[in-house]
Amino acid sequence: MKKLSTILLFVLLHDFAFAQVEPSAKRFRIGIFSSLFLDSSFTKGDYRFDKQMPRHILPGLDFTKGAMMAMDSVQTNGTLEYYIFDVKSEKQSISFLKTTRTFDSLDLIIGAVAGNDYKQLAEQALLHGIPFISSTYPNDGGVTNNPFTIIVNTTLPTHCEALYNYILRTFPTSNILYFRKKGAQEDKLASYFEKQNKAGNGKELLRWQTIWLKDSANTQEIEVKLDSQRVNLIIAGSLEEKFAQTLLKSVAPLCKRYPIELMGMPTWETMKDLTLPQWKDLSVYYTTTFFNTGTTKWSQFTNQFTVLTEGKPSDLAYKGFEQTWYFTNLLLKYENKLFSNLNDKSFFLFSEYNFKPVYNPVTGKPDYYENRKIYLLKRKNGLVSRMH
């Protein structure tokens, strides 16, 4: 319950604001947007769930707590005012905040949001000329011609580009098998790889066989597609966890008889099944935009978070801390030149960033800025190695 008291009650009692004050300096106002579900968690000030904490509350809480810890860490000669907004609260929703003209006074927006909340924040960022940091949503959400939107959690097409380039460099002569299932999302995923595979003259750079995986796929059906004399590179052409589990179960028994490398998707990063002992002999790859590079600041934050909350930080806690620290410092140092200095290495904490504009093919203007720094990880025998 300590995590509850240090996060939920802090937000309630402090009216969503936190400030570092130096009256003579320029004032910067930063809005932190996440899903805290305060309205549904409290009734007349009393917590509704006794000693329990519903799972849907935890992501927003961890991100917010990480952000709050960054607020305490930023060294500044100016004035900072942080405002924490619960987008699931009636009077903190983006629609309500628009009516109160809250966005008129913000200098930076940091949002752990998705879907319509993401779209609305992007719209407000463009309307008011405010940098909007989309912290967790791995999607452009259909946003175009909006140079004020900064996507930290890299989009799927960029992940596929990184995977494809690694395959092209490392496994060009392998027996490449692309496994997929029916579905609109799977069609899009396949199109991303196919686009990368077309050279400037339209010829295919790599050859692979597409195999439709059934829900009850068996090892024998897959074995006939394997080559005992070459590396068999298997690509998982779906983001669904059930599909991944079926593929893992079907391929694992074969890895001792055939040279197999299994290329997963970025969603595999959070798959608990990958840690199971029955997959330890498999070489499994996946991409991520967030990786512990071994800095001392990682362990310092972990220890501090544990002391404050009596719990371990999730990846969202790290992201809340890192991004609030990073972009606050960029704002303080560069002010209205922030977009020209998005990759200032002096403020890197845990991971590295590589922000680049994604240009609109019609207007020639940026649709948004995207973090294109991707880590390729390999898991085998219980160990995770960085490949790129």
Image (cartoon, rainbow, N blue to C red):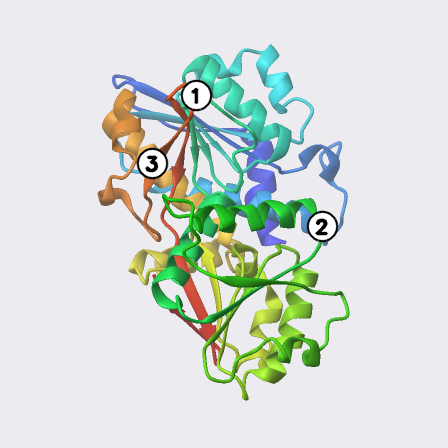
Residue at image position (48%, 61%) is 207
Q: Point out the tag, 3 or 1, that comes first from the N-terminus.
A: 3
Q: Residue tagged by mark 3?
A: 356
Residue 261 is situated, as x and y percent measured from the top left of the image, at 48, 73
Q: How much space separates mark 3 and mark 1, taking CA atoms?
A: 18 Å
Residue at image position (49%, 24%) is 144
Residue at image position (36%, 67%) is 170
Which quarter of the picture shows residue 7?
Answer: top right
Neighbours of disc 3 within 10 Å: few (<14), some (14-19), many (20+): some
Q: Point out the tag, 1 or 2, that comes first from the N-terminus.
A: 2
Marks 3, 1: nearer the viewer:
1
Q: Residue tagged by mark 2?
A: 54
What amino acid type should be assigned to the residue bearing mark 3?
Lys
Q: Point out the tag, 3 or 2, that comes first from the N-terminus.
A: 2
Q: Is mark 2 on a helix, strand or loop?
A: loop
What amino acid type should be assigned to the residue bearing mark 2?
Pro
- Looking at the image, can residue 86 be seen? no
